Amino acid sequence: MIEIKNVVKTYLKGKNPLTAVNGVSFNIADGEFVAIVGKSGCGKSTLLNLIGGLDDLTSGNIIYNGVEVGEMNSKERSNYRNKEIGFVFQSYNLEPHFNVGMNVSVPLIVANAKKAEREKMTKEALDKMGAF
């Protein structure tokens, strides 16, 4: 389970604060498939960066299976991203010479998953997305 509790992220734009995420709260249950949608500039990518431990919160809490993401050290966050949470990027960060299945399986290769396991997990993920 991921718990998002009153999450706020504020950046300084010069001397002025700019709040990209303001008091967002929701839970994601294990196995639940969630889409975050909204207008350009509304904070979707910032929220995903916070959930993934790529950026630090200004305030609030993100808790993954009882562990506060904001309290993880760099190595713990890296392991969290590698083993527990993943991102599907819109178009950048994809290898243009790879097909969709190959791009989806890259994190599994990095995690040293066996070929049969990678193929099974990749197919399951793509089936959920309606890609095949």
Image (spheres, helix red, strand yellow):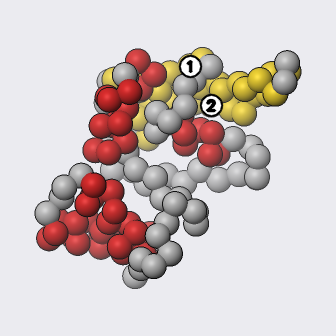
Q: Quadrant of the N terminus?
A: top left
- Graded by Cα atoms within 10 Å as few (under 14), some (14 to 19) or many (20 or more), the crowding at tag 2 reads some
Specify the label residue 130 is tagged with.
none
**Residue shown at 62% from the left, 31% from the top:** 24
**Residue shown at 32% from the left, 45% from the top:** 82
Q: Is residue 26 visible?
A: no
**Residue shown at 54% from the left, 54% from the top:** 35
Q: Position of residue 3 (x, y in %)?
A: 45, 30
**Residue shown at 33% from the left, 50% from the top:** 31
Q: Is residue 9 above or below residue 128?
A: above
What residue does disc 2 label? Answer: 24
Residue 101, located in which quarter of the rendered image? bottom left
Front residue of 122/28: it is 122
Please, what is the three-letter code of the amino acid marked with disc 2?
Val
Q: Position of residue 117 (x, y in %)?
A: 17, 65
Secondary structure of residue under mark 1: strand
Secondary structure of residue under mark 2: strand
- Graded by Cα atoms within 10 Å as few (under 14), some (14 to 19) or many (20 or more), the crowding at tag 1 reads some
What residue does disc 1 label? Answer: 60
- The answer to whether residue 11 is left or right of residue 114 is right
- The answer to whether residue 120 is left or right of residue 102 is left
Q: Position of residue 129 (x, y in %)?
A: 44, 69
Q: Is residue 38 visible?
A: yes
Asked whether disc 2 touches disc 1, contact meaning CB atoms under 8 Å apart, the reply is: yes
Q: Quadrant of the C terminus?
A: bottom left
Please, what is the three-letter code of the amino acid marked with disc 1?
Gly
How far is the residue under mark 2 from the one under mark 1? 9 Å
Front residue of 17/124: it is 17
Q: Is residue 83 above or below residue 98?
A: above
- The answer to whether residue 74 is left or right of residue 116 is right
Front residue of 7/79: it is 79
